[in-house]
Image (cartoon, helix red, strand yellow):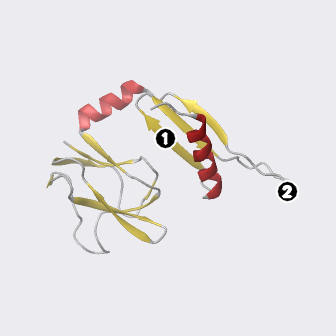
Amino acid sequence: MNFEIEYIEKLADLADKKQLSEITVEDGDKAIIIKRGGAASVAPGVVQTPVISAVSPPQADIQTEKSSKGTAITSPMVGAFYAAPSPGAKPFVKVGDTVAAGQVVCIVEAMKLMNEIESEVSGRITQICVEDGQSVEYGQVLMYVE
């Protein structure tokens, strides 16, 4: 994917419109990180623009992590991770469980909406990386399937 300037501008507009503090988009060895300004004060009538930087993530770490732990299931959004369908209920999956592609493995709550997260691959859960109720970021690894 080539990061076209129009695409970057749309991401910056989205970050500003939704008042997001940061957006990260990765594609292979390329990434775009858009961060909104910090504690600087803004005069009335002045629009604060996001800071845009392009970086290359450490490719060796990413390849090692995927091959040693399995396929990552990542969060498609910012929200709260829930391992079970309701408080006190049995978790969707636990380490050692076998899952099928399309099977619900957890929920990420975003803006009062419960979003079921499905496994994209069949296999065995080797690691659950977050705790029930923990806040998660877009792209954060939730668990690994081998």
**SS type, badge 1:** strand
Q: Cβ–Cβ below 8 Å for labels 1 and 2?
A: no
Specify the amino acid type for callout 2: Gly
State left or right for residue 129 relative to residue 122: right
Screen quadrant of the N terminus? top left
| Residue drawn 54% across the image and 36% down it | 32
Is 47 situated left or right of 61 in this image? right
Looking at the picture, how far across and down is residue 23, in whole percent? 54, 46
Q: Disc 2 marks which residue?
A: 45
Which quarter of the picture shows residue 77? bottom left
User: Which badge, 1 or 2, comes first in the chain's sequence?
Assistant: 1
Question: Relative to 133, does residue 87 appear above or below in the rendering?
Answer: below
Q: Is residue 42 left or right of residue 28?
A: right
Pick the front one: 79 or 118? 118
Q: Which residue is identified by label 1?
A: 25
In depth, the one of 8 and 59 nearer the eye is 8
